[in-house]
Image (tube, grey):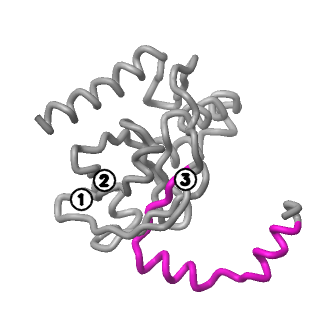
């Protein structure tokens, strides 16, 4: 039964991509139209889980609810992975579509070449492909961060090192610039 659910969700994701003219491959990524609602709530919080020997991680239930039955995982910046709900992914695709090809080639290669769609199984696990696991150094302990419109996935030790270097004075200055 659980394999059937996963196959149905994957098929629905593929059908969505076909129905809405999602084009994957080469230098061309694009999508026209939208049938999915925007993410209702912000993605917030920090959660720790372990990655298993097969490269599967349990996505926190709070994030699964917002990300939906089919979402996207790709390389982020600084050694983490990014997860996007379908609606946010659609926004990203539209922005790339609007950029001149010459300006978007390098970032498109970085961002889209490693991207994969993710369909959680009945236990809420997704498989992280080996290339993405290697990039983010995901070996055992994994930290999920909800950052408004995306989830970041970090090697826990790397996240703790980065978090320890955050300069609150710099954060205060950035908040002031935002009028907060």
* Residue 40 drawn above or below residue 75: above
Q: What is the x, y in percent for residue 5?
A: 20, 33
Which secondary structure, mark 1? loop
Q: Position of residue 96 (x, y in %)?
A: 63, 34
Q: Is residue 148 left or right of residue 135?
A: right
Estimate the x, y position of residue 4 in percent, counting from the top left.
15, 31
Query: Is residue 143 toward the left or the right of residue 50 in the image?
Result: right
Measuring 84% from the left and 74% from the top, which residue is drawn there? 173
Residue positioned most to the top: 19
Q: Which residues are magenta?
A: 150-176
Assess disc 3: are there few (<14), some (14-19) or many (≥20) residues with their C-alpha within 10 Å of its C-alpha. Answer: many
How many other residues sit within 10 Å of disc 1, few (<14), some (14-19) or many (≥20)?
Answer: some
User: What residue is at 42 percent from the left and 38 percent from the top?
Assistant: 68
Q: Report which quarter residue 93 is drawn in.
A: top right
Where does label 3 land, which residue?
A: 43
User: Which label's residue is closer to the chain start, 1 or 2?
Assistant: 1
Say which quadrant the C terminus sits in. Answer: bottom right
Q: Which residue is mark 1?
A: 55
77 displayed left or right of 101: left
Is residue 163 shown left or right of residue 59?
A: right
Which residue is pictured at 26% across the width and 65% down the height? Answer: 51
Front residue of 106/59: it is 59
**N-terminal of the two: label 1 or label 3?**
3
**Residue that badge 2 annotates:** 128
* Residue 76: image tag: none
């Amino acid at each position: 039964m659980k394999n059937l659910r996963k196959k149905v969700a994957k098929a629905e994701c593929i059908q969505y991509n076909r129905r809405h003219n999602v084009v994957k491959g080469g230098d061309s990524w694009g999508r026209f139209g939208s049938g999915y609602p925007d993410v209702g709530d912000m993605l917030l919080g920090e959660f720790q889980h372990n990655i298993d020997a097969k490269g599967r991680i349990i996505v926190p239930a709070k994030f699964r609810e917002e990300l939906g039955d089919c979402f996207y995982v790709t390389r982020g910046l600084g050694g983490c992975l990014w997860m996007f709900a379908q609606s946010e992914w659609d926004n990203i695709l539209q922005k790339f579509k609007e950029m001149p090809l010459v300006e978007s080639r390098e970032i498109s290669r970085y961002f889209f070449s490693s991207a994969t769609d993710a369909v959680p199984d009945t236990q809420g696990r997704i498989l992280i492909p080996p290339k993405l696991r290697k990039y983010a150094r995901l070996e055992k302990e994994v930290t999920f961060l909800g950052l408004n419109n995306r989830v970041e996935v970090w090697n826990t030790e790397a996240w703790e090192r980065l978090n320890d270097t955050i300069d609150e004075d710099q954060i205060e200055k950035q908040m002031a610039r935002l009028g907060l």
